[in-house]
Amino acid sequence: MKEMFSEKFNNIDFEFRRLVFSTNEVWYEIDFNNNGNKDSFKMYKDNEGTWKIAARQLPEWIKETEQEFNEIIIRNENL
């Protein structure tokens, strides 16, 4: 797996950073350009193994792509 990688989605570059806080706690911080402003959000793995966006005010189109980001992260974790 990669600690840092980029993925283009909906013509936007997303920068993924894998963050390890302990052996059991891994998060991803995802940076992107939001209409000229750098923005970011974090994702965590829930008890069922699905990567979820941590609660935060984000554009609706980001929230709607949570499943796609889940698949991108799973793909990276399985490298």
Image: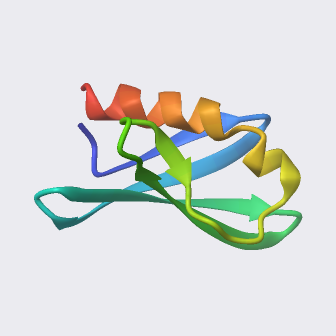
Q: Please provide percent x and percent y for residue 78.
A: 26, 26
State the scheme by which the image is colored.
Answer: rainbow
Q: Is residue 16 left or right of residue 67?
A: left
Q: Determine the residue positioned at 29% across, 34% down.
A: 77
**Depth check: 15 or 22 in front?**
22
Q: Please provide percent x and percent y for residue 11.
A: 78, 37
Q: Please provide percent x and percent y for residue 50.
A: 45, 37
Q: Please provide percent x and percent y for residue 22.
A: 14, 66
Q: Determine the residue positioned at 74% across, 61% down.
A: 33
- Total labels: the figure holds 0
Q: Would you place residue 13 above or below residue 79 in this image?
A: below
Q: Would you place residue 21 above or below residue 10 in this image?
A: below
**Depth check: 68 or 55 in front?**
55
- Hey, which residue is sitting farthest left in the picture? 23
Residue 59: name its quadrant. bottom right
Quadrant in which the C terminus appears: top left
Q: Is residue 68 left or right of residue 70?
A: right
